Amino acid sequence: MTEINETPEIPETPGSEISPEPPASPEPPASPEPPASTEPPISPEPPASAEPPASTEPPASAEPPTSAEPPVSVQPTEVSKEVNKDARMWAMFCHLVGLAALLPVVPLFGGAIGALILWQIKKDDFPFVDEQGKEALNFQISILIYILVAGILIFCVLGAFLIPVVIIFDIVFLIIAGIKANNGFHYRYPLCIRFIK
């Protein structure tokens, strides 16, 4: 007698294994949960499957709403870029002459005096030099005030640490301002008291 196989053959696909299907049972599987009642539970805690209540605050990972205004830039102010090569060169000199304050010939006041002289000579020739000369002079006056205050605080020992910090701050930002002015950017110093407007 020949046997007839009642299960149809399923074509094999590469990488898959054929598992025999369990026979269908007419009874539904027993559920571990008790049958649902028509009354809500009395517990003060929400059920684990319930969604949390909607809050009015956006989640921490959500991006802030966008507005029609562009974001504020932290970079130096760039109203326009100066194209005149001579104006850029003299503006750079206005900033870098502040390094004269480090020379023993004209200590402390050399930076402010040098910036004042260059600004007065070239302010009428180039508006860019006028603007950057004022900025350089204001920064040199601010640095002079910071050095004098640190000198007074030297009696409290705090000034011994502040004087080198102010000098390094002065050198770094003078170089940055000189480079930016030579590239034609309208540079503004940080922590600068603007006496001359």
Image (cartoon, grey):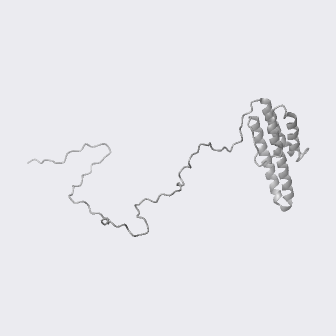
Considering every residue shown, the one lying at the far right of the view is 105
| Above-or-below relation of 87 to 153 | above
Quadrant of res 52: bottom left
Residue in the picture at 80% in, 55% down:
162
Of residues 183 and 129, the one nearer the viewer is: 129
- Decide which of 128, 92 is in the foreground and name it: 128
In this picture, residue 133 sits left or right of residue 27: right
117 shown above or below 28: above
Residue 108: where, in percent of width, then height? Answer: 88, 48
Which residue corresponds to the image point at 27% horizontal and 48% vertical from the top-left? 18
The residue that appears at 89% across and 42% down in the rendered structure is 113
Q: Position of residue 50 (x, y in %)?
A: 41, 60
Residue 161: percent from the left, percent from the top? Answer: 80, 56
Q: Quadrant of residue 82?
A: top right
The C terminus sits in image quarter? top right
- Taking the image as shown, residue 91 lies to the left or right of residue 16, namely right
Considering depth in this image, is 11 or 101 the residue closer to the camera?
101
Q: Quadrant of residue 14?
A: top left
153 over 185 or under it: above or below: below
117 to the left or right of 80: right
Q: Is residue 34 left or right of residue 54?
A: left
Residue farthest toward the left in the current orientation of the protein: 1
Residue 181 placed where, x, y %? 76, 37
Count how many numbered circles sit on residues in the image.
0
